[in-house]
Amino acid sequence: MTQKDNTTQTSDSLWRPLTQHQTMVYNRPTRIVDAQGCHLTDEAGKQYLDGLAGLWCVNVGYSRSELIEAAHEQLQKVPYLSPVLSTDAPIALANKIQSSLGLPGHVYLTASGSEANEVAFKIARQYHNQSGQPNRYKIIGRHRAYHGNTLGALAASGQAQRKMKYGPMPAGFLHIMPPYPYRALSEETLESHGARCAQALEDTIIHEGPETVAAVIMEPIISGGGVLVPPDNYLSAVRDICNRYGVLLIFDEVVSGFGRTGATFGHTHWQTQADIFTFAKGITSGYMPLAATFAKEEVFEAFYGDQPTDHLRSINTYGGHPVAAAVGLKNIEIIESEGLIEQAARKGDALMAGLSEALANHPSVGEIRGKGLLIGIELVTNRESKTPLSNAKMTEVIAGCKQHGVLIGQNGNTIPGHTNVLILCPPLIIEETQAGQIIEVLRNVIYAVLDA
């Protein structure tokens, strides 16, 4: 590292994720000192409207006293318990998740979405092994999708930049292209595009050998990869293909669960069920680390047996943490009692309409898409070529929004040369005036940066 003369280093000892720390050596990063509702406040007193809900998770907003009290009460009763033992809060939370899904099954609790997906892979492979098909081990994911930071979850992810310099990845993970209507073939309809992408899955299963494929994992809506919403016929076609070849279907609902898309879960928009579901983020609105893996009862029952290796041999020290579970229960209660799912649908439609009107005439706004309060804005050099906007320009847009008090994101650290989607996912409690602030700031910054 090159030292600069007559300057004082301002870096601290915290290693931050997805951050080039060279820029921080002589520039002290902004520190947040308060969080209330939809806003964050830094040490200088500047307030920011959080258009990302933290990291896609603070669904009920910051500093909810009900969640703080739920944690406090549980800390006084059972502050920690080995996950092999039982106490009320994790059991009640598991029952709530099961009833919300409307499927018989069991819930395995962990502390992060990455862990939840790792458990899903273990369940899928062991299920087939104990069902008389020991050669089924392959997991099919999709390009652009993200399933976590641990090596197995990263291997299942389809984001090349996240994997660079960490290879080789664990074996047995394959990828297919996802539906991407904005970049579909010119002659395709939404329906034919959905059918073609589903056919790619069937072709892959056939060519790999169905007897070797354990599971398919997918987010109902690809989130961090650019908010890619599938055609209406896609998920049901995937379900049919999995049924046809005896492949388990895993829905990663880490982002789309618990109201984010204007439905309880993302998959309910398409009335299609999986065999295994994973949840995190919005399950506690980020107030405590918590995640869940749900397996349908017929999958769970394959783990009954007399052999010492018949049960699921997986454990997480903080899995089913009673304080996190208590917060999760109260968080879901708030989401339901305040009608935040319905609000997300209504407010999302209004935000999409406002953005569409404000940005309709800008030639670099290729598409605005999403469901509920999960919205992506794809920026291009022009609408005819659809060439992705450069990352440098994307960075300018995001920095400009921050300068004007609005925090937004992008599909960064994902696909080299295709990090051109702005992402909005504000807390579900966002008010009309706050949505208007997002629209106004985005419009002004996009015109200022891209017309300069």
Image: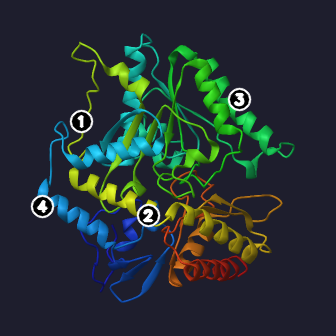
The disc, 2 or 1, on the residue closer to the chain's N-terminal end is 1
In the displayed structure image, the side of residue 119 where residue 196 appears, left or right? right
Residue at mark 1 to residue at mark 3: CA–CA distance = 37 Å
Q: Are marks 2 and 1 in contact (CB under 8 Å)?
A: no
Most foreground residue, 82 or 219: 82
Eye-nearest disc, 2 or 4: 2
Q: Position of residue 444 (x, y in %)?
A: 66, 83
Most foreground residue, 218 or 399: 218
Q: Are marks 1 and 3 in contact (CB under 8 Å)?
A: no
In the displayed structure image, the side of residue 210 where residue 284 appears, left or right? left
Is disc 3 surrounded by few (<14), some (14 to 19) or many (20+) residues within 10 Å? some
Q: Are marks 3 and 4 in contact (CB under 8 Å)?
A: no
Image quadrant where one finds the C terminus: bottom right
Image quadrant where one finds the N terminus: bottom left
Residue kind at label 1, given as amino acid type: Ile
Residue highlighted by disc 2: 337
Residue highlighted by disc 1: 315
Residue at mark 3 to residue at mark 4: CA–CA distance = 54 Å
Is disc 1 surrounded by few (<14), some (14 to 19) or many (20+) residues within 10 Å? some
Residue kind at label 2, given as amino acid type: Ser
Eye-nearest disc, 4 or 1: 4
Residue highlighted by disc 4: 76
To which quarter of the image does residue 396 belong? Answer: bottom right
The residue depicted at 36 percent of the width and 58 percent of the height is 284
Residue 199: assigned label: 3
How many marks overall?
4
The disc, 4 or 1, on the residue closer to the chain's N-terminal end is 4
Eye-nearest disc, 2 or 1: 2
The disc, 3 or 4, on the residue closer to the chain's N-terminal end is 4
